Image (cartoon, rainbow, N blue to C red):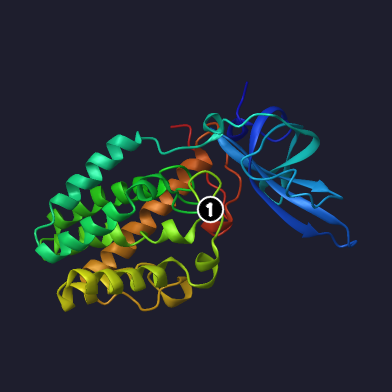
């Protein structure tokens, strides 16, 4: 049986899946509807339920039996739902997408990079913050959708960036490796406050109103004072967080103004985009195009036969 991510346009879905998201809406005719994101280990798909707004009956983490046809809607797949039944099942693990590496391996490798930081105050604050929210840091996704939006996605994203940073620091010895490693570990740390949980993440109230960048700067200020961290160490770490989206129109409070901040922005963007493209193309046959990705400039991508 094919999973959600393996189904092509025109094929039928008829199996157990998990509701990952459930959102109310009002149609043009004034009638209510629900947008559901249905998920399994291979991917997810959007569908609509018309003439209902019962988010309690069709809530995130509920397991359902869904049937319908996969359609093309403006370059993206969507399920034309024909039947859905809520099941008396609570084990969601079978339906969760997770990082391609075991959590224990991600933990071990990330902690090794943290231990490699030489500057004392920098290592102290990074270790303190990761230890403080250890379980959340290594289980949360990095997003609700798009890049690394899966279980342990945040720490897997960090590990991938650490590997890039390590090689780039060897190629460009003028870079402060300690600062780059610390920036990678901390840049998305506050996603654990921005997003609700590892399985069916939604934006929290602080996530919506403040955002992970501002939340992280405040956390650094607080913990920096508690640990009496050197003022410049604290300031440059805050700059890395504030500038890691690159430009104000992309969410950064300031543009990168250090070499390490520029590299952090570039490898963050690289890893995010590569992960999105890999997920888009994972089940695409050679010689075919993926569906369109709004996050990637509404482009579809070709998988060569080579």
Which part of the image, by quadrant, shows the N terminus?
A: top right
Residue at the extreme right: 29
The C terminus, quarter of image = top left
* Quadrant in the picture for residue 266: bottom left
Q: Is residue 176 above or below residue 40?
A: below
x, y (%) of residue 17? Answer: 65, 32
**Residue at numbered disc 1:** 144
Please tell me which residue lies in front, 33 or 192.
192
Q: From the viewer's side, name the closer residue of 286 and 143.
A: 143
State the residue at coordinates (17%, 77%): 232
Residue 3 percent location from the top left of the image: 60, 29
Residue 60 image-quadrant placement: top right
Mark 1: give few (<14), some (14-19) or many (20+) Cα within 10 Å. many
- Would you place residue 199 above or below residue 214 in this image? above
Q: Secondary structure at mark 1?
A: loop
Q: Position of residue 216 (x, y in %)?
A: 36, 68
Q: Is residue 86 left or right of residue 156?
A: right
Q: Which of 232 and 74 lies nearest the eye of the viewer? A: 232
Looking at the image, residue 154 sits to the left or right of residue 293; the answer is left
Image position of 17 (left or right of 79): left
């Amino acid at each position: 049986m094919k999973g959600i991510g393996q189904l092509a346009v025109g094929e039928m879905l008829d199996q157990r899946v998990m509701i990952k998201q459930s959102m109310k809406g009002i149609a043009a005719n004034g009638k209510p509807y629900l947008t559901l994101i249905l998920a399994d280990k291979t991917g997810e798909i959007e569908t609509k339920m018309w003439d209902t707004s019962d988010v309690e009956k069709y809530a995130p983490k509920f397991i359902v039996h869904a049937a319908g046809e996969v359609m093309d809607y403006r370059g993206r797949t969507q399920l034309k739902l024909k039947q859905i039944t809520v099941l008396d099942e609570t084990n969601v693990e079978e339906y969760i997408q997770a990082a391609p590496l075991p959590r224990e391996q991600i933990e071990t490798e990330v902690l090794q990079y943290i231990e490699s930081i030489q500057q004392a105050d920098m290592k102290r604050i990074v270790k303190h913050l990761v230890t403080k929210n250890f379980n959340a840091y290594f289980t949360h996704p990095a997003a609700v959708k798009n890049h690394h939006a899966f279980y342990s996605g945040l720490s897997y994203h960090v590990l991938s960036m650490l590997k890039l940073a390590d090689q780039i620091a060897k190629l460009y010895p003028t870079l402060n490796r300690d600062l780059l490693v610390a920036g990678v570990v901390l840049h998305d740390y506050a996603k654990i406050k921005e997003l609700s949980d590892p399985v069916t993440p939604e934006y929290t109230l602080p996530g919506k109103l403040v955002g992970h960048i501002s939340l992280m700067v405040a956390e650094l200020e607080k913990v920096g004072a508690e640990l009496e961290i050197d003022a410049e160490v604290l300031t440059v770490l805050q700059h890395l967080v504030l500038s890691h989206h690159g430009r104000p129109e992309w969410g950064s409070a300031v543009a990168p103004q250090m070499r390490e901040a520029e590299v952090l922005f570039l490898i963050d963007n690289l890893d995010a985009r590569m992960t999105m493209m890999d997920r888009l193309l994972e089940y695409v046959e050679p010689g075919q195009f993926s569906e369109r990705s709004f996050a990637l400039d509404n482009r579809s991508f070709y998988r060569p036969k080579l």
